[in-house]
Image: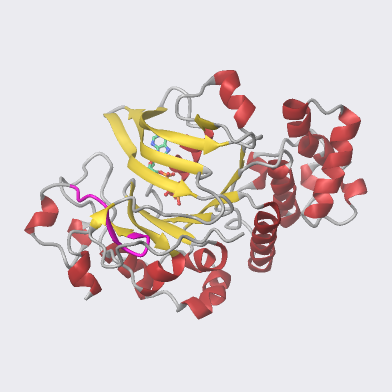
C-alpha cells in the first residue's frame, strides 16, 4: 500500500495550510495534531514551548520532525504521549487525535489517568534516545518486554515471556531465549535499544514515536537501528514520528518532514521536495552546508549535528513579535516583524511559514 501524499491540486501554491493530502487506501490519518500549544510554568511565568502546532501522519507513513536544540521536538513527543512533567508542563490548547487499533479516534490531549494509560504502550509507544530511560535495571529483559502484554492484553507471565522472546528475535537480538533472562546492564547499548524497540512494539501500536533513537549510539550501530526501524515500520504498516536533529537520517527514514523553529513548524512537505526546493530561509540555512541527498549516509555517519546558522534561537521568554526567524534572516523585511506569519500551501503538499516564499523560491 502506498501512502505517499498525492500532488496538491493547486501546484502553484499560495492556498491555506494544511493543504488537503489525499492518501491511497486510508482516509483517516493515524495522528492528527491541531493547534497544539504546550506551556511550562517557571519562576518568570509561563513559557510557550510549542505554539499552535499542526501535524498529521497518514497510516503507514513516517514523518520526521527536525530542528535545532530547543525548537520543541521533544516537548511535542511528550505532549502526544501525555508524559509532560507533572505540575510544570501542560497542554494549554489544541487536540492530539490518534486513531487506535480499534479504528476509534481519541483526543489524547484531554485523556488522563487510566484512560491515557490504556492507550500508551498499546496504541502509541515511544522509543527514547537513551534506552535506560525505559528499561528498569532490576527486571529481566523478558519480563520488561512482555510487560505491555500483561498490562494491556491480560497475558499471563508465561505467555508474555514467550511473546517477549519472539519479539526479541524480530528485533535482531541473537539467542533471545537466553537474553530474556538477562538484565539491561548485561547488554550493549545497541542491544538495549533493540530491547526497547521490542517493548514498544509488543502491543502492535498504530503510532511509534522515536525520539533521537540513534543519537546515543556509535556510528555503525546507528545505521543498524535505523535499518531495523525502517524494516519494522514497513512490515507492520505502522505510522512513525521520527524526531531527529540530523538531516541525513531524515532522508533515509521519512517520507515527509516537518521543520521546527522556536516551537512552530516553519516548513513541511515531502522529504524530496523540502530538500530540493526548500521554501523557508531557515530550512535553506540548515541545508546549505549539508551534503546532497546522495551523501546522506556520510552525514549520518559523521554524526554531525545540524549546520550552524548565524545568530541564536530567540528565548521563549522574549519572542520577537513577528516571524521568530526574522532576526536571523537575510530576507526579512518590515512586514516580517509585525505578526507571526501563517503557514501557507506552496504547492505539492508543501507548506512554508514565510511571507517571502515566492521570492525565495525564485
Ligand atoms: N521541563 C521543562 N520545564 C521548562 N521548560 C522546558 C521543559 N522541557 C523543555 N522545556 C523548554 O521547551 C523548549 C523546547 O524543548 P525541547 O526539549 O522540546 O527541544 P528539542 O527541540 O527537543 O531540543 P533537543 O534536540 O535538544 O532535545 C526549550 O526551550 C526547553 O527549555
Q: Residue furthest left?
A: 334
Residue 315 sits inside the magenta stretch: no
Quadrant for the C terminus, please: bottom left
Query: In this rendering, would 322 be left or right of 26?
Result: left
Foreground residue among 92 and 308: 92
x 58%, y 50%: residue: 239
Residue 344 sits inside the magenta stretch: yes
x 29%, y 29%: residue: 46
x 21%, y 42%: residue: 318
- Please say if 18 is above or below 306: above
* Color encoding of the figure: secondary structure
- Please say if 97 is above or below 175: above
Query: In the figure, residue 53 lies in which quadrant?
Result: top left
Foreground residue among 357 and 260: 357
* Residue 114 position in % (x across, y down): 60, 19
Query: In this rendering, would 260 be left or right of 57?
Result: left
Query: In the figure, residue 66 lies in which quadrant?
Result: bottom left
Ligand 1 located in image quadrant: top left
x 31%, y 69%: residue: 284
Please give the range of residues in magenta.
340-350
- Res 235 seen here: yes
* Residue 89 position in % (x across, y down): 41, 29
- Res 353 seen here: no
Foreground residue among 165 and 54: 54
Foreground residue among 319 and 6: 6
* Residue 162 position in % (x across, y down): 89, 40
Q: Say how many tags the image has.
A: 0
Quadrant for the N terminus, please: bottom right
Query: In this rendering, would 134 be left or right of 344?
Result: right
* Residue 223 position in % (x across, y down): 65, 66
Amino acid at each position: 500500500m502506498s501512502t505517499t501524499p498525492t500532488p496538491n491540486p493547486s501546484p502553484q501554491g499560495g492556498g491555506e495550510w494544511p493543504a488537503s493530502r489525499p492518501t491511497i487506501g486510508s482516509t483517516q490519518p493515524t495522528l492528527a495534531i491541531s493547534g497544539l500549544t504546550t506551556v511550562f510554568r517557571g519562576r518568570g511565568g509561563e513559557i510557550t514551548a510549542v505554539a499552535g502546532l499542526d501535524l498529521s501522519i497518514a497510516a503507514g507513513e513516517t514523518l520526521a520532525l527536525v530542528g535545532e536544540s530547543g525548537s520543541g521536538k521533544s516537548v511535542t513527543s511528550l505532549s502526544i504521549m501525555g508524559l509532560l512533567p507533572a505540575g510544570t508542563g501542560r497542554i494549554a490548547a489544541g487536540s492530539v487525535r490518534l486513531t487506535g487499533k480499534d479504528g476509534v479516534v481519541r483526543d489524547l490531549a484531554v485523556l488522563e489517568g487510566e484512560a491515557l494509560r490504556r492507550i500508551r504502550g498499546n496504541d502509541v509507544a515511544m522509543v527514547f534516545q537513551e534506552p535506560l530511560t525505559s528499561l528498569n535495571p532490576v527486571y529481566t529483559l523478558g519480563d520488561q518486554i512482555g510487560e505491555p502484554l500483561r498490562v494491556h492484553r491480560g497475558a499471563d507471565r508465561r505467555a508474555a515471556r514467550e511473546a517477549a522472546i519472539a519479539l526479541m528475535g524480530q528485533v535482531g537480538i541473537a539467542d533471545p531465549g537466553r537474553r530474556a533472562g538477562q538484565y539491561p546492564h548485561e547488554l550493549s547499548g545497541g542491544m538495549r535499544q533493540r530491547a526497547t524497540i521490542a517493548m514498544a512494539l509488543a502491543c502492535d501500536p498504530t503510532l511509534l514515536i522515536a525520539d533521537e533513537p540513534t543519537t546515543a549510539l556509535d556510528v555503525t550501530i546507528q545505521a543498524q537501528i535505523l535499518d531495523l526501524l525502517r524494516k519494522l515500520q514497513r512490515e507492520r504498516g505502522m505510522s512513525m514520528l521520527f524526531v531527529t536533529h540530523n538531516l541525513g537520517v531524515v532522508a533515509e527514514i521519512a517520507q515527509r518532514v516537518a521543520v521546527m523553529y522556536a516551537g512552530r513548524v516553519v516548513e513541511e512537505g515531502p522529504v524530496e521536495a523540502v530538500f530540493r526546493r526548500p521554501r523557508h530561509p531557515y530550512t535553506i540555512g540548515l541545508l546549505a552546508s549539508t551534503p546532497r541527498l546522495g551523501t546522506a549516509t556520510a552525514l549520518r555517519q559523521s554524526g554531525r549535528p545540524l549546520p550552524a546558522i548565524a545568530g541564536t534561537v530567540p528565548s521563549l521568554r522574549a519572542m520577537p513579535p513577528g516571524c521568530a526567524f526574522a532576526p536571523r534572516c537575510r530576507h526579512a523585511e518590515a512586514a516580517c516583524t509585525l505578526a507571526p506569519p501563517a503557514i501557507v500551501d506552496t504547492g505539492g503538499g508543501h507548506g512554508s511559514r514565510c511571507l517571502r516564499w515566492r521570492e525565495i523560491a525564485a
